[in-house]
Image (spheres, helix red, strand yellow):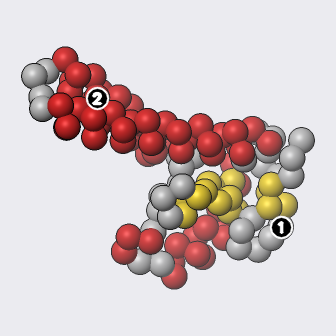
Amino acid sequence: MKEIYCQHCSKHIEDRGDLVVVQQGIWAIEPYHTKCYGAVAKGLSGLLVSGPINSRVYSLSIILTVIITIVAIFLDIQGIIKLVVLFYLLYVISMRAWSWLNYERHVST
């Protein structure tokens, strides 16, 4: 198994409960310990703060985006709005999948 290291303290992350995967920029994601993420998040403000990708809130946002996408597809909504919603859905799902493939599956539960 691949070892995952915290971006803040560079120590090994052993437990999935201690892993926080955070989006940095548009495509980059980085792993943190829970405590390290708290320390890093305190120093950031505004648009730079990203919530954890491997959280229940992010999973809920994916579910809500799926519902909105289904509604947009079946209702008579403008074509560009459908595309924007669909691309956003693909984006949030791809970020979640990227997080799982690169980090979450490599740490124990």
Residue 14 vs 80, above or below: the answer is below
**Disc 2 residue type (three-letter):** Thr
Residue beneath label 2, please?
69
Q: Residue at x 75, y 38 (%)?
A: 105
Residue beneath label 1, please?
11
Task: Farthest residue to the bottom: give it.
Answer: 43
- Mark 1 vs 2, N-terminal side: 1
Q: CA distance from mark 1 to mark 2?
A: 40 Å
Q: Secondary structure at mark 2?
A: helix
Residue 7 shows in the view: yes
> In which quadrant of the rendered view does residue 39 lie?
bottom right
Task: Farthest residue to the right: give it.
Answer: 1
Quadrant of the drawing holding the N terminus:
top right
Left or right: 51, with 69 as reference point: right
Left or right: 44, with 17 as reference point: left
Residue 21, given in percent of the width and then of the height, sits at: 62, 54
Q: Residue at x 38, y 70 (%)?
A: 47
Q: Residue at x 41, y 77 (%)?
A: 45
